[in-house]
Image (spheres, rainbow, N blue to C red):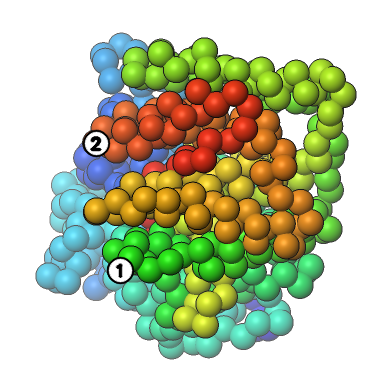
Amino acid sequence: MSKAVTRTLTTPPGLLASLDPLLREWLPRQRWFAGKGRPVTGFSLVAATELLPPGGKLGLYHLLVRAHQALAPVPGAPEQPADCYQLLIGDREALPPRLAPALIGHVAKGPLAGRTVYDALYDTRPPELLLEALRTGARIGVLRFERDAGQDIRSGLVPRLVTSEQSNSSVVYGDTFILKLLRRVVPGVNPDLELPLALAREGCDRVPAPTAWIGAELAGDSYVLGVLQPFVQGAADGWELALRELAKGEDFAAAARALGRATAEVHTALARTLPTVTLGHTQVRQLVDGMVERLEAAAQAVPALRPYAPGLRSAFAALADLAADGCTWTAQRIHGDLHLGQCLRSPAGQWWLIDFEGEPSRPLAERRMPQPPVRDVAGMLRSFDYAAHSADPPVPGWADTCRAAYCAGYAQVSGADPRTDPVLLRAYETDKAIYEVVYEARHRPDWLPVPLSAISRLAADAGTPATSTPLSPPAPRRP
């Protein structure tokens, strides 16, 4: 491993103030911006690191900024705690045509007056600088570039930004590495680094082992900003693969069974390397209370859900009753947001699980809590339903076949078929379907019938998981 390079750089005063009017327009348009629908009222600077000095052909700043927003998009509404975003801002005299999609705007005043600023990840030189900093273990301002000494990082790899919609940003280097840069960041141990590192130590080859990572130390808090992992060349994500097989009328059961085995391998490895806990009456009661609260809030937000609310509550009540009768369950660290788009399959047929960040809208402490593995299983079962509803024309029975194959594959490795605990599975499928209803009502109303069809079946089910149910919205391609 190369000796760490340390640089302490200063940032010109007034930088954020000069960018403020441009960021107010640009930031809410980004796919990864979490506060859509509420105007940005201002920014505060968490950290600024100058990576290339301004005034030359290319200047480059790494910024961590808090975007302040009102709770509701109305004047005078109270503000909520501001989200912190990671930005890589380039500045040039003028943008070449190839960088037109990256434009943020033209700076009118301040230290960058007269310059054009843009999202530097679209360029080539800024991502090259990040890779070189990771390769050398650099320290630049508050930024810390760490790496696994056992893995080699070659210099000179050509970067390209992944332009498909996703909740973060990813850069592929040649066909060797992919760097996932988190956009909305929070202090603490991020499971997107924590869990792959733990799985690598355990020897689980179902998750690409982190090669290097970017962090920051600020006022006693640690932030994970990005993770570099091997790029699985030629791999297709599970969502794209399922849609392709559906379009061709091909059977997906064998792939689903193999994916079930891969999921169970990850779960068993996590249970070996990280602590597990037993959920008794008190803990399950808390889980159920959270599910009921989410149902009540969803029914208020989406009137179409209200007729089903009594039947949906029965799914949660059945779980609470089992716990009251003395049933217990094991909880452990899990993926937390598992669906077809979080899986990659190589041309040789091997499955990998990726993106262990969990649901980004949930608090970090919650995402790191041990949970029943069936939560991941329920997510994947519902994802098969979403894929089936995307087929035109529909393929009857496709989702049922995939769900059964996935559970059978899972049982082959874990020794326990998730379908043998129908009350727990139904509760988690119901909780996920409720989440989907709210998501689709807010973001994609045309898709609302997909989770509502599952809601109808789950509400009518007296105690076994519905035979045809979905997952999270069609997921973005990896990061």
Amino acid type of the residue that numbered disc 2 sits on in the rendered structure? Asp
Residue in the foreground of this view, choosing between 317 and 75: 317
Looking at the image, which residue is at 53% across and 68% down? 254
Residue in the foreground of this view, choosing between 436 and 450: 450
Amino acid type of the residue that numbered disc 1 sits on in the rendered structure? Lys
Q: Reading the chain from its start, which is encountered first: label 2 or label 1?
A: 1
- For label 2, the SS is helix
Seen in the image, is 413 located left or right of residue 192?
right
Viewport quadrant of the N terminus = bottom right
Seen in the image, is 252 located left or right of residue 35?
right
Kindly report the distance in space between the C-alpha atoms of the residues bearing marks 2 and 1: 24 Å
Looking at the image, which residue is at 48% across and 15% down? 309
Question: Which residue, given by chain and number where applicable, does mark 2 sit on?
Answer: 446
Residue 22, position as x, y percentages in the image = 22, 43
Looking at the image, which residue is at 75% across and 18% down? 321
Looking at the picture, does residue 308 appear above or below residue 22?
above
Viewport quadrant of the C terminus = bottom left
Question: Which residue, given by chain and number where applicable, does mark 1 sit on?
Answer: 248
Front: mark 2 or 1: 1
Looking at the picture, does residue 280 appear above or below residue 140?
above
Looking at the image, which residue is at 83% across and 45% down? 276
Residue in the foreground of this view, choosing between 474 and 175: 474
